Amino acid sequence: MEITLLGTGDAVGTPHVGCSCPNCTYAKEHSIERLRTSLLIKNGNFHLLIDTTPDMRRQLLNAGSPKIDAVIWTHGHYDHFMGFGDFYRVQRIPPVYGAPEVLASCRQVFHFLLKEEHPVSTYTPFTVCGLEVILVRVVHPDMFTTGVVISDGKIKVAYTSDTNEHIPQETKNLMKGADLLLIDGLFPASFKKVEKHLNYEEAIEMAGELMVKDFRIVHMSHIIPFLTPHQGHDGEVFRFA
């Protein structure tokens, strides 16, 4: 199994349009970005995409233009599904998996393009691309949102890009001990508290509580400096034998 961080930024990405803060200036001077957060998972010859961001076209080009075999949507916010239209006239429209509440939200926009939907209740294991997947509840007011726990039978990866600290215990139990945790950390605690998201320090604390083997912080705003420890980077790849 191979995991690629296609993007690690928040809803507007870094650098912000028109922003001259130190972090956005650093990004422009070093020609780096944080595109909107999404994951590409390769398992054998299959490619599974977690969330289809508005940056999807460029993210897939950066990843070598893989054919996507299936998509999972975690929730119906713009930055997590709106790029699905980029499949049009590029490849066969892939099947989409998600909680029924999530599919219902996203279907309002892409009803004309969706060819195959697979509603899956939370905490119900299913198989896609040769992987066992469980959609798990997280708390992201006021949108029904899931995290994802994925296993190839040897390695477990847990992902939640949008949640606050009130993650249900059932979700924590399934994420516990993951080989890799990818977790939301929008701002440093010194900036401000956001009801909908973990901050950087809370994300690190959660990784410790879950006793994971490795973790990266994703869904970061431009307030997080690019040299901050534990952060994920666009294009970062994790390979598991």
Image (tube, grey):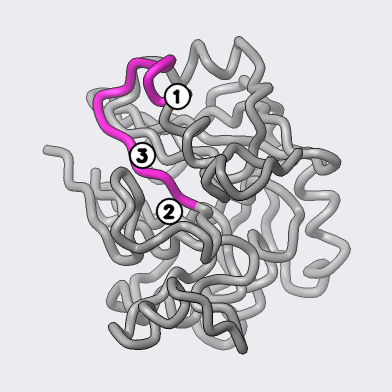
Label ID, residue 48: 2
Instruction: Look at discs 2 and 3 and give the one toward the viewer.
Output: 2
- The residue indicated by pointer 3 is 130
Q: Nearer the viewer, residue 202 or 179?
A: 202
> What is the crowding at mark 3: few (fewer than 14 residues within 10 Å), some, or many (at least 20)?
some
Q: Secondary structure at mark 1?
A: helix
Q: Secondary structure at mark 3?
A: loop
Tell me whether circle 1 and circle 2 mark residues in contact (CB < 8 Å): no
Q: Quadrant of the C terminus?
A: top left
Over which residues does the magenta segment extend?
206-218
Q: Give yes or no for residue 209 being in the magenta stretch.
A: yes
Which callout, 1 or 3, points at the residue further toward the start of the chain?
Answer: 3
Q: Is residue 180 left or right of residue 23?
A: left
Separation (CA) of disc 1 from disc 3? 32 Å
The part of the image, by quadrant, that contains residue 85 is: bottom right
Q: Amino acid at mark 1?
A: Glu
What residue is at 59 percent from the left and 31 percent from the top? Answer: 135
The part of the image, by quadrant, that contains residue 205 is: top left
Please state the horizontal and vertical placement of residue 111, each as a whole percent of the image: 82, 67
Separation (CA) of disc 2 from disc 3? 10 Å
Q: Amino acid at mark 3?
A: Gly
Q: Is residue 20 visible in this depiction of the protein? A: yes
> What is the crowding at mark 1: few (fewer than 14 residues within 10 Å), some, or many (at least 20)?
few
Considering only vertical position in the picture, is 111 above or below 147?
A: below
